[in-house]
Image (cartoon, rainbow, N blue to C red):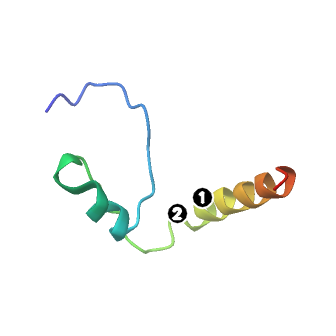
Amino acid sequence: MDTHEDIVAIGLLTQDDIRRLGNNFSRLFPVPRDGAFDDLIKAIDDADRERQQRVPG
């Protein structure tokens, strides 16, 4: 595995998402539920909520 490839995306996936991706998904780094990413998750949720309020329909 070439570890010098450019990163093009980072995703926060559920266990169900991982199952759907199956064996083709080869690089997974689990994030412990220790609260370290709580602020990031809240910011993403807030931004999504604001986007949904701006988009009609």
Label annotation for residue 3: none
For badge 1, the amino acid type reads Leu
Residue 33: % across, % down: 42, 74
Crowding around mark 1 (Cα neighbors within 10 Å: few <14, some 14 to 19, many 20+) is: few
Crowding around mark 2 (Cα neighbors within 10 Å: few <14, some 14 to 19, many 20+) is: few
Image point (67%, 62%), residue name: 45
Q: Seen in the image, is 49 located left or right of residue 16?
A: right
Residue 44's image quarter?
bottom right
Q: Do the residues bearing badges 2 and 1 touch, measured as CB atoms within 8 Å?
A: yes
Image point (59%, 62%), residue name: 41
Q: Name the residue under label 2.
A: 37
Report, in whole angstroms, how far the alpha carbon at label 2 lies from the one at label 1: 5 Å
Q: Residue furthest front?
A: 57
Q: Seen in the image, is 49 located left or right of residue 35?
A: right
Q: Residue furthest left?
A: 1
Residue 34: % across, % down: 44, 74
Callout 2: helix, strand or loop? Answer: loop
Q: Nearer the viewer, residue 24 or 2?
A: 24
Residue 28: % across, % down: 27, 53
Q: Seen in the image, is 37 located left or right of residue 4?
A: right
Q: Mark 1 points at which residue?
A: 40
